[in-house]
Image (spheres, rainbow, N blue to C red):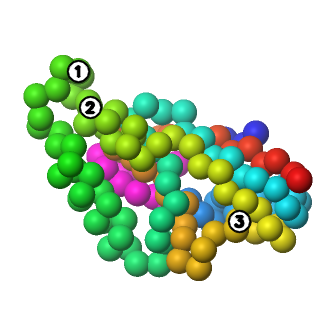
Amino acid sequence: MVSLSVTTHSRTELVDITSKVQEIVEKTGVNSGICFIYVPHTTAGVTVNESYDPDVARDITTTLSRLVPSNFRYEHTEGNADAHIKSVLVGSFQAIPIEKGRLALGRWQGVFFCEFDGPRERKCLIKIISG
């Protein structure tokens, strides 16, 4: 398993980690298999979505902030209840097929680390399975 460090700069941010994950896949030499990506944080997540147009990531963060506002009257009083809820909506895990040594993503797809309680130094755990 490989730990990938991710530095975030905003409270809510989607960071494109596709190239870093692809580098990890290439270093393993696995030609065909699965790349598992797990985020071991309760206020962050990981998703696959369009990476070509940066407006898509902004639209996602803006919409999540509208759906789950930070200033709602939550029972959790630590000040980051919205971040916990957003991470549940996005999820903390992705499984991406590997074909011919490459992540089998669609033409416009990328892998995004989703920060909801930043800025912080975070990590993603990456496990490559051959087969």
Which numbered dot is residue 76? 1
**Residue at (49, 54) in percent of width and height:** 47
Residue 9 colored magenta? yes
Quick check: 14 left or right of 68?
Answer: right
The one nearer the camera, 116 or 89, is 89
Quick check: 33 left or right of 35?
Answer: right
Helix or strand or loop: what does disc 3 sit on? strand
**Residue at (24, 57) in percent of width and height:** 63
- In contact (CB < 8 Å): disc 3 and disc 2: no
**Residue at (25, 36) in percent of width and height:** 82
Say above or below: 105 vs 44: below
Q: First in sequence: mark 3 or mark 1?
A: 1
Percent of width and height locating residue 113: 49, 52
Say which quarter of the image contains residue 73.
top left
Residues shaded magenta: 5-16
Q: Report, in whole angstroms, how far the alpha carbon at label 3 lies from the one at label 2.
A: 33 Å
Say which quarter of the image contains residue 28.
bottom right
**Residue at (17, 52) in percent of width and height:** 66
Helix or strand or loop: what does disc 2 sit on? loop
- How would you rate the neighbour count of disc 1 (Cα within 10 Å): few for under 14, some for 14-19, many for 20 or more? few
Say above or below: 4 vs 107: above
Helix or strand or loop: what does disc 1 sit on? loop
- In contact (CB < 8 Å): disc 2 and disc 1: yes
The answer to whether residue 24 shows anywhere in this view is: no
Q: Which residue is mark 3?
A: 103
